[in-house]
Image (tube, rainbow, N blue to C red):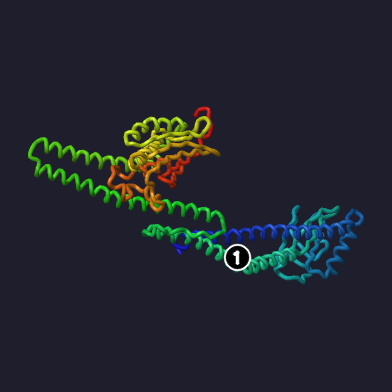
Amino acid sequence: MRNLLKRTPFRLAATFSLFFITTVLALFTVIYLVASARLVGDIRDRVRTNMDSLAVLDGDRTFDDLVTVVAEESESVRDPDFIVELVDKDGKFLAGNVKGVPQSEQWMTLKRSDLNFTMDRGEPNDEFLALWKPLAKGRLLVGSDNSEVKQMKSFLLRLLAYGLLAMSVPVVLCAIYFARQTQHRIDAFANPLARVSQGHISARVPISGLEDDIDQVALQVNGMLGNLQRLIENVNQSSSDIAHDLKKPLGRLRQRLDNAFRKAGTKAEFQAALGDALLDIDSITETFDALLRITQIEAGARKDRFVVVDLRVLLADVHDVYDIVAEDAGDKLSFAAEVDGAAAVRGDPELLVQLFANLVENAIRHCPSGTQIRLQLSGSAGAYRVYVSDTGPGIPESERENVFRRLYRLERARSTDGSGLGLSLAAAIADLHGAKITLADNAPGLRVEVSFPAAEISARG
């Protein structure tokens, strides 16, 4: 029972049932009070009417006639629901079918069992609604049985009992139905999440197709689970790639140190071996620094440094720096801007420089001498696109998604320098800036496109 009370569907069903019953009871109470007041008002009107019909004989000369009429009415009355008593100013009984009723200025509710009848043909449990009226030489009591009120109240109470009994079945059935539906929707969330917690990260929350708010939450949960799956897969892949890629330099480092320890015969030979070992250590350190930098970028740690950046100026600076580097490698680097005015985007200038520097360095490193490398800027409809294209060997279409993985390197690129983190870092920087990076065939070569949302024009920049 304790577990049942903790279930949201049960609480919803109980709340729905309680609300419905409370509403019915409130409505019944209003009807009950209004009907009772109406019937009591009708009885009082009847009492006043009878009293007024007798009081027309009230007067110093006609009072004796009133006594006679009341006496005749009392003797001839066939209705046990009517009482009348006439007394003089001293309270002495003169006529009527009851005696000794206490005098009051207010309406009274009198039980038949408490009254002294001169002639009684009614039920002991009857009650009367009565009122005293002062006259010229005495006082007149007139009352009427309020059994109508009692009958009405009894009828309404029976109606309420039968009504609640009749309505309780559909109410309970509706509550059970809605509770089951709600529990089903909750289980649709709970079961996949339980599977995810057990390691089945591909589990997803089913979509009902109703396009309601729960479906919207399900879509958001599925999006979160998708991101979680990608992160876990990236971590697993990165761990595997790190182990694979660092095994070789660590083995080479150990071999060099072992050779220096065993075979170095002179100080110069020992220092040369140590120098090579330090280069290997620097390479390993550089790899870990790049991995940490990617992690920081993916966490959004640099967004507080965002300012409005002119891509035209930034790309021109990148071209100026790497023009000489490309020339030394036997390549040709060119730059063209096909936009009018500034190409304003919001971002971290340092990271954006690193993004395009990595793309240019990647083209220089993996393309043969004589490659044409082109930087190009264009813009339209609130977005700017930067192209870094080359005439080198390109990347097979089947490998274009893989090269963004950390430490992933094409087979033909494993003999070249580099850690396999250049494109991973570029992708992380692009994602931080809300940009989209894609690879395409340049026929021949590779074309990298980075699409940025344009910054809103602001006087403050």
Give above or below for 240 relative to 143.
above
Q: Position of residue 312 (x, y in %)?
A: 46, 32
Give above or below for 177 relative to 380.
below
Q: Amino acid at mark 1?
A: Val
- On the question of residue 301 being in view, the answer is no
Q: Position of residue 76 (x, y in %)?
A: 85, 69
**Is 175 on the left-hand or right-hand side of 415?**
right
Residue 178 falls in image quadrant: bottom right
Query: 163 or 405: which is nearer to us?
Result: 405
Residue pictured at 52% horizontal, 30% vertical: 341
How many marks can you see? 1
Q: Counting other residues with Cα less than 10 Å from the Cα at mark 1, is it few (<14), some (14-19), or many (20 or more)?
A: some
Going by the picture, which residue comes out furthest to the front? Answer: 370
Give above or below for 115 relative to 378.
below
Q: Which residue matches tag 1?
A: 171
Residue pictured at 76% horizontal, 67% vertical: 117
